Amino acid sequence: MILSDTKILESIEKGEIVIEPFLPECLGTNSYDVHLGKYLAYYKDHILDARRHNEIEHIEIPEQGFVLHPNTLYLGVTQEYTETHNSVPFLEGKSSVGRLGIDIHATAGKGDVGFCNTWTLEISCTHPVRVYAGMPIGQLIYFMVEGDIKNYYNKKKNAKYTERTVRPVESMMWRNKF
């Protein structure tokens, strides 16, 4: 079941969902709009290695915006810090962003119960497009969880993305054993 606007507000009042900053005008019928933060990043190496720590270069988006180019994976970040303690957050791109040819996530649209952080975005585009810090970039949709939760993300020993940040975070796949 997807939470409605009134259920999202109730969950915020109870501390079950945290959105900072929270702006009432960003609350939709059954979602909350999030915005592109001021930092982007890209990988330094052309060839990435899943067993290696692939370093990234951070960019601060200037006032006049930043042009994204096809065939480059950019990591972005939401302005909003979020916490979810009893529901599953899904991040989807806004249709207006998709109509500009921008994808905001390659595979990681679902968060975990207990995720507490900004969202790193896996941004790609079909043709050059200028983006701006603060532009609406996606929407969070919350699904109820049925049953008790034993393994909250923020309490897992092997959770890789728990350090609070305002910058995009690179893949930590290299921390896995394979």
Image (cartoon, rainbow, N blue to C red):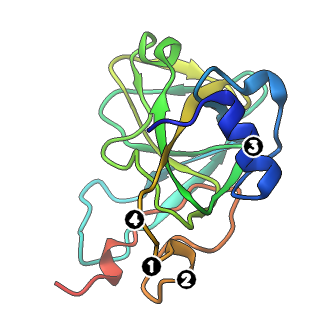
- At 40% from the left edge and 72% from the top edge, which residue is drawn? 172
The mark that comes first in sequence, 1 or 3, is: 3
Left or right: 51 as drawn, with respect to 30: left
Image location of residue 100, percent across then percent down:
45, 12
Label 2 neighbour load within 10 Å: few <14, some 14-19, many 20+: few
Image location of residue 146, percent across then percent down:
41, 58
Rendered-image quadrant of the C terminus: bottom left
Q: Nearer the viewer, mark 4 or mark 1?
A: 1
Label 3 neighbour load within 10 Å: few <14, some 14-19, many 20+: some
Q: Secondary structure at mark 4?
A: loop
Q: Which one is in front, 75 or 59? A: 75
- Return the residue at label 4: 171
The reply to whether dot 2 and dot 1 touch (C-beta < 8 Å) is: yes
Q: Amino acid at mark 3?
A: Glu
Left or right: 15 as drawn, with respect to 176: right
- Return the residue at label 2: 155
Q: Nearer the viewer, mark 2 or mark 1?
A: 1
User: Relative to residue 48, is residue 109 depicted above or below?
Assistant: above
Q: Is residue 19 in view? A: no
The reply to whether dot 3 and dot 2 touch (C-beta < 8 Å) is: no
CA gap between label 2 and label 1 equals 7 Å
